[in-house]
Amino acid sequence: MSPVIPLLILVIPLAMFLFLGLCGHKMSHRWAGILGTTGMGVTMVLAYITAFTYFFSGDPSFIDADTHTRLQAILFNQDWLNFYDKLVIRLGFLLDPIAALLLVVITTISFMVHLYSNGYMRDHHGVWEKGFQRFYAFLSLFSFSMLGLVVATNIFQMYIFWELVGASSYLLIGFYYTKPSAVSASKKAFIVTRFADLGFLIGILILSYYTGSFDFTDFTSAPVGGPDSTVYRIDPATPSHILSVFQNSAAPIFMGGSVLTWALVLIFMGGMGKSAMMPLHIWLPDAMEGPTPVSALIHAATMVVAGVYLVARLFPLYLMEPVALDIVVVVGAITALYAAIVACTQIDIKRVLAFSTISQIAFMMVSLGVARPEFHEGLGYMAGMFHLFTHAMFKALLFLCAGALIHAIGSNDYTAMHGLRKYMPVTHITFLVGCLAIAGIIPFAGFFSKDEILTATGEYSTFWYIWMSAVAGLTAFYMFRLYYLIFWWKEHKVPEGHHTPHDQPWTMTLPLVILAAISCVAGFVPMGNLVTWNGVEEVTNPNFFTNLGNLNWGVASVSLAVAIVAIVIATIMYRKENPLPAKMKAALPHLWEWAHHRFYWDELYQFITHKIIFGCICKPIAWFDRHIVDGTMNGMAYVTNKISYAIRGFQSGRIQLYVLWYLIGAVVLAAVTMICVLC
Amino acid sequence: MLFSNILIYFVIIPLLMLGGFSLCRGEKAVRAVAITGSVLLLGLSIWVLCDYIALRRAGETAEMLFQGSWMWYEPLNIHLAVGVDGISIAMLLLSSIIVFAGSFASWKIDNIRHFFMWLLLLSTGVFGFFISIDLFTMFMFYEVALIPMYLLIGQWGTGRKEYSAMKLTLMLMGGSAFLMLSLIGIYYQAGLHSWNLLEIANNAHIDKSWQYFLFPMCFVGFGVLGAMFPFHTWSPDGHACAPTAVSMLHAGVLMKLGGYGCFRVAMFLMPEAANDLAWIFLILTGISVVYGAFSACVQTDLKYINAYSSVSHCGMVLFAILMINTTAMTGAIMQMLSHGLMTALFFAQIGMIYGRTHTRDIRLMGGLMQIMPFLGVGYVIAGMASLGLPGLSGFVAEMTIFVGSFEHADMFHRVFTIVATTSIVITAVYILRVVGKLLFGPVQDPHHRELTDATWWERTSVVTLIVCVAGIGCFPEFFEWLIRYTFNHDIFHAIPAAIQSVGI
Amino acid sequence: MDINILYYLIPSLFMFCCGLYGFITRRNMIAILISLELMLNSVDINFAAFNRFMYNDQLEGMFFSLFAIGLAAAETALAIAIIINVFRVSENIDVDDVVKMKN
């Protein structure tokens, strides 16, 4: 495959960003929107071509036909910064199953969001949002960065784009920069993820120090056909070789873990930041201050799964250190439960969706963490990627629906909504599809991916299986609670002077319909044939089940039953106005209170940053600098000054005194000389 | 003979400009001379760069190119000796860019003729310093660069300007006293009756016990100018009180004299002591990096924030130099370039904002993005460069430093590298705090609504710097090559093999 | 009685000390000038004496004394001129009070 198409996939969004960023304010809003959308559309088509070629062309650089193994192909790799020898940052394009999958996901969602924003970013009278062109420029920047991230050929390229997605997320969350809450949310998002990236960076440093390389292919794969080849295949021998490097190089055991474990855990910390795992999750709910399409694109579908993608990318390496994977499981499982509980009590619909996102990403993390080659050939890995794909679709759908609702009502608060189903039928149906998908009802997308995650978890440990099933039940419950509260509950009352809410223009409804359609059918994608941890197509493996016929019906029926029970409970409690929710709240006052305040994590962070870091570190240091260090310097000047005042009497200008001192000096000198000579 | 050497024009052009200013009548003429001169200097440095590349590509392997030497004072064998390698050229380029941007930034200053005269005298010193390879003339140019600072801050400054100017000058002079001592020590200990850097490096070996004595003095002497903890306190006050162009030149170029000198004199001539005593200075510079960043978090004056941020970033330069390996040292030079450009950008814009709002207190400002979008965007870009966003210069420099430093085989060095990496988070904290308070949010003071955005000359200044910052950030390989070539051919002949093997 | 060099040096030393004492303690400019002359003359005596006793065949010391006397005369003239001018300005020739040019 020629490198032109992959290159264009990256260049078009970048060019859009530069063009719209520099010249956007001179263009009309409409044209800026059309240009941005078209650019993304072209990118999407190119990404589809690339992914299709990769999966289905049978090209020998993409698939080894004999062993049915999908390969990793480096389509281009340009040196960017040369540290020394092998430590070179290259900007390149690595195509492998997960990269191709992510290319499709990102460009699809991004295109939908670009299209949708044409309608969303103007009010009911057709007046464009201020900074509309800037919005499109940032969206393009984000798309560029995210695409660059997923096709990274080396871990430093990933880090570069990782930072860039962070920055574009910062810019987009703070899009309404006159709103103090948006500004502080964007700041929080950037700093929290930056803190996580510190771990990532240190992890990279450790890894590259011991292995002498940044390239993913050096970590996980072996070249196919000679060392100069640009085609690689995942080879468990490579990471075990790296492991032996760590074991042989007298690498110290640091606090009970090998250095490789520490490196992997630190890299996972970077992933925790971006993917909003506990305890670094606090930025994501606040990030909902950004425009809703941004939340759909960045904070639901693409950027937040970067952490999952990172672990998947280094998965063969993680397999070498199962401790690191166990940590991934524990962090993921706890986060999943926490976020699901919190989501049950939130009032702002975007926050509910945000916590739901955290919970679902935690599902993916757990799925990766439980994957072992000995369990169904690493089913968890495939399931995690599958869930990433389906979740991106239905969560983007839900967010875009929420955007449509917010656009219609002008508030994020569901108490202002209630009973909208008659006014906004398209939104209603598509939202329902999204809810069914996330709840895991057959045959919607979420059912398949979630079922496989649960199967994989069951193989790993029964405890976590029950735990995750409970979380899945909670998911169904809070989503349907949200659904009923928005669309049912009681009749909608239009406030005085407001127009009746109604469905949105086609630019907004079309993405909803498309995404809903995808959510209906995405479950039937034969993911097992496409994405596996070592690239081996599962057709050859009879133990593997991907689509309906091969489901593990035992697990599937249990999870389906749990989901249906949860939905029934939600229906009873929230379909009509009734006292049950209040009663439940009264029954569990503390839990409700804590969940409503998100278990006071924000307050804890507030305390740590303001009281400890600012109050106990920065302020004392600043004081020390002003008073001690500077004081020493000023003190020296002061002392010099005083001394010069003290001795200035010697320079009185009176000749006679000079003579006297001269005489005394001469006499003393003479006396000293005499004594010296005599003794 | 003297005039056939291209480098000497770096000193002659500013001197001619000085003459030009004394003939000028009226502001316009002064501006014309200043702009012409700075364009000439910029052109000259680009020309030297191209020439240098052409020579290197043609296979020229001499350590320093364009060498020339003219006897100045026979009894002590002092020469005016010039010569450049990739590092000096990078520094010359940086200086000329900042002089160029600074000339535009000080378009409307009182008593413009005298201002530019002193500014150009300062530039003469800076350029002279970078082209010199004779220790004595180098020191002389160093002093020439320092003295005008006193007058520039004292006369055109704001706030407690006399105090700051005095403090700055005295501290730097204290540093130069150490420096002078160590240079004389080197001269006598080398025993070659020569002040020439290359001759000393190639032919002399300074006794190790003397190195232990001279190296700390030399490093501290230059380190004062490089704002090394605890000798950095001149920097916040000095920057805060200096006028815009002076802050730009000072942070952008003058502080680089420190790093450059540490590398060129202290490390280059006394590598063994450098290797043995590095740990002391690593601790000090490591403290600088983190301490500067933490201090910046709670400042309320825009210039103080950037001054402390400079302490942190310049600390990184010295930190990396002390690692004594090619990658880290390349990173150090990159950081000098990067920090020079982005701090100049910061100070230029702070000056422009201050010129409009007449305050630098971030608590009194807010929402400036709505009022002056150009300056706002420029400030955000400068901030992003400072906190190390890929695609801008800061990232490239910092990552080179971190990777290079972490390659050091010694555990102590690696641990300190990790300590230094934490600064990237703290930097993000204070940069975003400022950006959030200053530019975003609602407009704090209704009077600010009437303010105007940047004028064309201010835009020229800002755009030049942004283009340079982005240029380094997007195409680092070129600069990396420029600097690395020098290291590969220059430094390791002087450093014993035992040290070379460390981490490389 | 053998007249040795001490017979010259001791009075000369005495004169010099008187001059020095006067120079340091006196506040009147004329008195200071006189003290100065006293010291100069004592030195002249030394010159002449050393020449006579140590280098009898040479005359440099004698000439130097003559030269010093001439210079002293010129200097006295100059000093008195200054003192008179000072007196005209400040009506006073006390050195402690002539502080106009200080500061």
Image (cartoon, coloured by chain):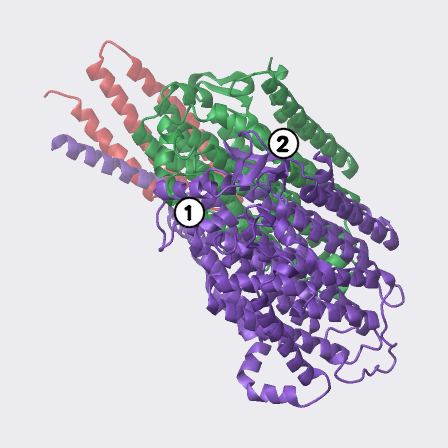
Chain colours: A purple, B green, C red
Q: Between tags 2 and 1, which lies in front?
A: 1
Q: Is mark 1 on a helix, strand or loop?
A: helix
| Residue position marked by numbered label 2 in the rendering | B93
**Which one is in front, B307 or A491?**
A491
* CA gap, disc 2 and disc 1: 32 Å
Q: Which class describes the residues within 10 Å of circle 2: few (<14), some (14-19), or many (20+)?
A: many
**Which one is in front, B25 or A349?**
A349
Query: Residue drawn 34% across and 42% down?
Result: A250
Does residue C96 show up?
A: no
Q: Which class describes the residues within 10 Å of circle 1: few (<14), some (14-19), or many (20+)?
A: some
Residue B210, how many percent across, how many down?
Answer: 32, 30
In-image side of B202 versus A572 (left or right): left
Question: Which mark sits nearer the N-terminus, 2 or 1?
Answer: 2
Residue type, mark 2 in image: Leu
Residue A90, how many percent across, how many down?
Answer: 59, 37
Judging from the image, mark 2 belongs to the subunit labelled B
Task: State whether residue B321 is above or below residue B350.
Answer: above
**Which one is in front, B238 or B43?**
B43
Residue at the far right in the pictured view: A125
Residue at the far left in the pictured view: C1
Q: Which numbered dot is residue B416? A: 1
Task: State whether residue B361 is above or below residue A338.
Answer: above
Q: Which numbered dot is residue B131? A: none
Judging from the image, mark 1 belongs to the subunit labelled B
Residue A357, how many percent across, how many down?
Answer: 63, 65
Does residue A129 show up?
A: yes
In-image side of A15 versus B227 (left or right): right
